[in-house]
């Protein structure tokens, strides 16, 4: 692994910004440099100061005038849904039954899973995403392909074999015992191998029987350090159906709480339609509500009250994600553009500093991984991206009138996509896509 000095304009968040003028919330170097050694950031700061610390003859890469920031983190997406994106349907349940479940049945085939894994990681890298939290299919083959490709590329990834034993096609069903045994096998084979992290993954309450929820609970008790991922309150029909299946539950959130699945490493996709009691329960458990704006708009699921949840007396931890393939873009920039619009419709403001904090340090904090990813702080892994706010003719024209860093970030968020990503580094290595 070659040591290197990477030069450019650096930005890294220290904490959540309180306002558009909160310059104390981030570190910015107009002519900065990162010293990368053994895949980690050894120094961050002014170019001249960092250069003086670097060994003679070190490889130097000059990305000026572009911005260098931590790689984006995507907190919720579905690895088997690459060929489901842009499928026309009325709502979540129709979309699942018509397109998604039939597609996921194909992931029993090792060759298909491996092929899609290559494309999946290529898209993440192209869009500047260096860590993602993914659902595989119910088949262990899909988890094997997902983690093998992550290992090959040296990426920090979280994923899990989905557990589902009802309300899906026969080719997508396991059993409580099989879900437990295969998840345990995935943990044994992949967790901690390279930068892989296995998540316990009951898809959602509708597709798991009480017996399977107990199996997920047993896994959570045996492996308390693992993440748990599932879906919550995405759609009104889903909520009604869940309560029919679990009539003893106070509400949808109570289903997961009953089985011991709510905690600080629980990642709950969507969580749009929460009662005050449910929001309190998430807050008290430290669980994370994962906002998936392009998916929520595409499927007509609802407007996520992000700002309202964050400023509650009992605030709810929030993360952001693409939710491919209900989501319509792999780009975290496009994702935050839609998140901004959703808050606008709710009469709220989401400033660009907050957006870039959420895509980087904020999501790393939600993952309990901020010591390793999400910042440019010395000691963290050198997962970096280089962004060009003048990447397209229209963006270049707008950049002529941009005066401040927040204005530049907002331009990237509003008009940027994969074309704005000049380079993606994983553990200090510039990544090339396989295809």
Image (cartoon, rainbow, N blue to C red):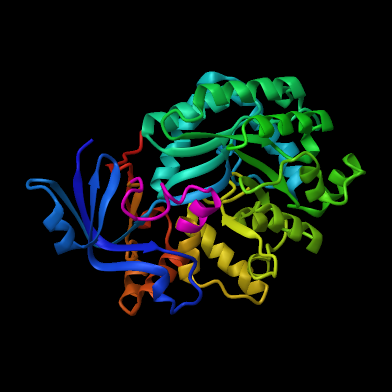
Give the image quarter of residue 123.
Answer: top left
Q: Residue at x 45, y 56 (%)?
A: 360
Above or below: residue 204 compared with residue 349: above
Q: Is residue 433 left or right of residue 182?
A: left
Q: Is residue 435 visible?
A: no
Pick the residue in front: 148 or 255.
Answer: 255
Q: Position of residue 264 (x, y in %)?
A: 62, 49
Above or below: residue 171 compared with residue 238: above
Quadrant where the C terminus is found in the figure: top left
Question: Is 374 included in the stretch rendered in magenta?
Answer: yes
Q: Position of residue 128 (x, y in %)?
A: 40, 50
Q: Residue at x 76, y 52 (%)?
A: 233
Q: Residue at x 34, y 63 (%)?
A: 11
Give the image quarter of residue 348.
Answer: bottom right
Pick the residue in front: 188 or 386.
Answer: 188
Q: Residue at x 36, y 33 (%)?
A: 434
Above or below: residue 345 compared with residue 243: below
Q: Is residue 308 left or right of residue 332?
A: right
- Please give the range of residues in magenta: 361-381
Q: Is residue 263 visible?
A: yes
| Main SS class of the magenta portion in the image | loop
Q: Position of residue 37 (x, y in %)?
A: 23, 43
Give the image quarter of residue 216.
Answer: top right
Q: Position of residue 374 (x, y in %)?
A: 42, 53
């Amino acid at each position: 692994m070659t040591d290197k000095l990477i030069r450019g304009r650096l930005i890294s968040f220290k904490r959540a910004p309180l306002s558009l003028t909160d310059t104390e919330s981030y570190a910015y170097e107009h002519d900065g440099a990162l010293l990368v050694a053994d895949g980690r950031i050894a120094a961050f700061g002014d170019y001249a100061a960092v250069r003086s610390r670097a060994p003679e003859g070190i490889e130097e890469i000059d990305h000026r005038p572009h911005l260098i920031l931590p790689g984006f983190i995507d907190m919720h997406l579905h690895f088997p849904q690459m060929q489901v994106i842009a499928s026309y349907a009325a709502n979540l349940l129709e979309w699942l039954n018509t397109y998604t479940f039939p597609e996921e049945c194909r992931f029993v085939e090792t060759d298909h899973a491996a092929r899609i894994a290559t494309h999946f990681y290529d898209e993440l890298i192209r869009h500047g995403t260096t860590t993602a939290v993914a659902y595989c299919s119910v088949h262990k083959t899909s988890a094997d392909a997902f983690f093998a490709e992550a290992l090959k590329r040296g990426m920090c990834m979280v994923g899990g074999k989905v557990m589902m034993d009802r309300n899906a096609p026969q080719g997508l069903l396991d059993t409580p015992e099989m879900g437990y045994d295969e998840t345990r096998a995935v943990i044994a084979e992949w967790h901690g191998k390279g930068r892989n992290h296995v998540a316990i993954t009951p898809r959602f309450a509708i597709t798991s029987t009480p017996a399977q929820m107990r199996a997920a609970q047993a896994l959570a008790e045996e492996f308390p350090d693992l993440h748990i991922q599932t879906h919550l309150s995405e759609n009104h029909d889903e909520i009604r159906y869940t309560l029919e299946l679990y009539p003893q539950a106070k509400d949808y959130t109570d289903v997961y709480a009953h089985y011991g699945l709510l905690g600080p490493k629980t990642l709950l996709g969507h969580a749009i339609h929460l009662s005050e009691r449910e929001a309190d329960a998430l807050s008290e458990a430290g669980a994370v509500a994962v906002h998936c704006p392009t998916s929520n708009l595409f499927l007509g699921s609802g407007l996520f009250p992000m700002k309202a949840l964050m400023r509650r007396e009992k605030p709810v931890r929030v993360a952001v994600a693409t939710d491919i393939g209900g989501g319509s873009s792999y780009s975290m920039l496009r994702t935050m553009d839609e998140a901004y619009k959703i808050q606008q419709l709710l009469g709220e403001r989401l400033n660009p500093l907050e957006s870039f904090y959420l895509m980087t340090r904020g999501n790393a904090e939600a993952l309990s991984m901020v010591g390793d990813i999400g910042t440019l702080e010395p000691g963290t892994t050198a997962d970096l991206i280089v962004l060009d706010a003048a990447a397209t003719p229209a963006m270049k024209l707008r950049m002529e009138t941009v005066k401040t860093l927040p204005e530049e970030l907002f331009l990237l968020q509003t008009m940027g996509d994969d074309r704005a990503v000049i380079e993606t580094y994983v553990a200090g290595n510039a990544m090339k896509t396989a295809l």
